[in-house]
Amino acid sequence: MSTAAAPAPDTAPAPPSAVPAVVRVSLPARLVSTTWRVQSSARVALAGGGGEQRIDSYALVSWSAERQPHGALRASGQVDSFTVRSGLDSRRTAPVPTMPALILLDATLDSGAVRVSTRPPLANECDRPEASAAALARDLLVRVPNGVAVGDRWRDSVVTLTCRSGVPMVVQTTVLSQLEDLTDEMLVVRRDLAARYQGKGGTAFRTLELTGTGVGVQRARVHALRGTLERLDGMMTLTLQATERTPGNAPRSQQIVQRTEFSAVRAR
């Protein structure tokens, strides 16, 4: 006598897989005073030869800041030391003229503007060592909006003034940032930089026009709990076209290429 097979028990449906929660950044509003050791190493070469100029800069920079919800910063700081050495090829390097031992700075930073100024302001910023020190310090102000998650991007557009050989130049820079990684202790931000340079100076007997572009990349490591920049590394390539004009003569042009490596490490 055959017996009927027992019906198979109903298979319970598998529970839906949990969707991992998106972790978003929330940095503290107040950034305590932090000090970094900063180094910038530039190599400047003229097209067609003529040697390579080395410009190495070292600084000890401090900032404290208040952060707004969208990442804007209002900061005050100082440069405690700033040294520049310049040389051609293998010749012995020599320091540039001395500068004040202490430079006080104020800064504002948002998605559309960044301004770092000395206190008191310089009457003329062109080719002043104080202005170069302020430019090094400016790179340490990294904007991270609240609420970003891994993979998110944000854009900053900045217009600044710089000088080259006494010629004032307007620099328009776009920074595209992306949060590459986020742990309990650290944010890793990649910053892609694209810049345009344009300037003109001289006298009625000689004018010099400078135009060019720059591209670079930086990687910033920011402490997730303190909100302080722990380390910043980057490199930038600038290509300039210099055109000299004198009355009665054909314009003379020369290309200048500058490659710069930059690093900053939190000292305290």
Image: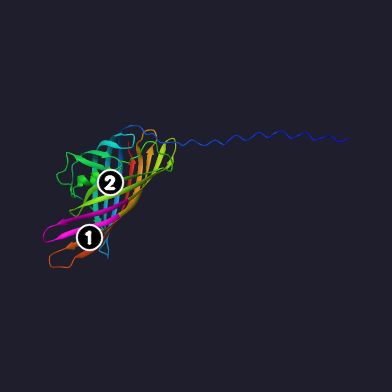
The image quadrant where one finds the N terminus is top right
The image quadrant where one finds the C terminus is top left
Image vertical order of residue 174 relative to residue 34, above or below: below
Question: Of residues 111 and 240, which is closer to you in this image?
Answer: 111
Tags 2 and 1 touching, CB below 8 Å? no
- Which label's residue is closer to the chain start, 2 or 1? 2
Between label 2 and label 1, give the one nearer the viewer: 2
Image x and y of residue 245, in percent: 16, 63
Local crowd size for mark 1, using a 10 Å CA cut-off: few (<14), some (14–19), many (≥20): some
Tell me the kind of residue under disc 1. Ala
> Magenta stretch containing residue 201, yes or no?
yes
Q: Secondary structure at mark 1?
A: strand
Q: Is residue 254 visible?
A: yes
Q: Quadrant of residue 25?
A: top left
Question: Of residues 168 and 166, which is closer to you in this image?
Answer: 168
Q: Which mark is drawn over residue 63?
A: none
Question: Of residues 225 and 85, which is closer to you in this image?
Answer: 225
Per the picture, the main secondary structure of the magenta-coloured stretch is: strand
For this orientation, the residue located farthest to the right is: 1
Task: Return the residue at label 1.
Answer: 242
Image x and y of residue 127, in percent: 19, 50
Image x and y of residue 11, in percent: 68, 35
> Magenta stretch containing residue 89, yes or no?
no
Q: Secondary structure at mark 2?
A: strand
The boundaries of the magenta stretch are 194-213
Q: How many marks?
A: 2
Image vertical order of residue 125 relative to residue 65, above or below: below
Task: Return the residue at label 2.
Answer: 158
Residue at point 26%, 36% (across, down): 75
